[in-house]
Structure formats: structure tokens, C-alpha cells
Amino acid sequence: MVPRTGVTVDICPRDLPIALIAAAGGALALWAEAPVEIAIPVALLIVLDIRVRSWRRST
């Protein structure tokens, strides 16, 4: 048998101060007329803690 590789993506919100900073940054970007397609994903990357892990399952 060949071991299979897998990927786990964990997404959880960060602590409150970082979330407030990201929300304020997103609001500032929208107020400065930055495109919504850029401002919202950047704010989400700041607010969310995203971890990508790869693992091997031994059989």
C-alpha cells in the first residue's frame, strides 16, 4: 500500500484586538474608495487565523 497524503485547513477567528484593527482597516479601505474585491479579502486575512497542515496517514 502507498501512504496517502492529506491536507488540513484550520480557520478560526483571532483575538478581539486584532479583529477590531482589521475591521477598522477594512472600513478605512472602503472609505478611501479601494475596490471591495481587494478590501474585504485583506480584512478577512487579518481577522482569521488560517493554518494549512499536511499530514501522512500510515497504514
Image (spheres, rainbow, N blue to C red):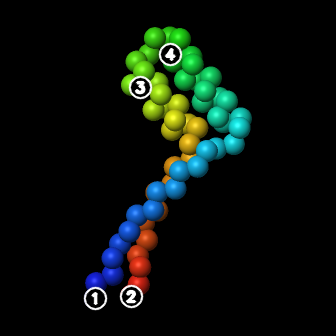
Disc on the earlier residue, 1 or 4: 1
Name which residue lies at 50% across and 11% down.
32
Q: Amino acid at mark 4?
A: Leu
Q: CA distance from mark 2 to mark 4?
A: 51 Å
Helix, strand or loop at label 4? It is: helix
Please state the horizontal and vertical placement of residue 52, each as a whole percent of the image: 46, 57
Can you identify the residue that label 4 sits on?
Answer: 30
Q: Which mark is residue 48?
A: none
- Which residue type does callout 3 highlight? Ile
Label 4 near label 1: C-beta < 8 Å?
Answer: no
Residue at far left of view: 1
- At 41% from the left and 79% from the top, the residue drawn is 57
Q: Nearer the viewer, residue 13 or 56?
A: 13
User: Looking at the image, do the residues carrying marks 3 and 2 touch, with CB atoms under 8 Å apart?
Assistant: no
Amino acid bearing label 1: Met
Crowding at label 4, few (<14), some or many (≥20) Cα neighbours within 10 Å? some
Mark earlier in primary sequence (3, 1): 1
* Disc sitting over residue 38 in the figure: 3
Report the residue marked by disc 1.
1
Q: Quadrant of the C terminus?
A: bottom left
The reply to whether dot 1 and dot 2 touch (C-beta < 8 Å) is yes
CA–CA distance in space, label 3 to label 2: 43 Å
State the residue position of label 2: 59
For marks 4 and 3 on the same chain, the one whose residue lies earlier in the sequence:
4
Q: Give left or right: position of 48 versus 36.
A: right
Q: Secondary structure at mark 1?
A: loop
Q: Position of residue 38 (x, y in %)?
A: 41, 25
State the CA–CA distance, disc 1 to disc 4. Answer: 53 Å
User: Tag 2 or tag 1, which sits nearer the N-term?
Assistant: 1
Image coordinates for residue 35, horizontal then vertical, percent: 40, 18
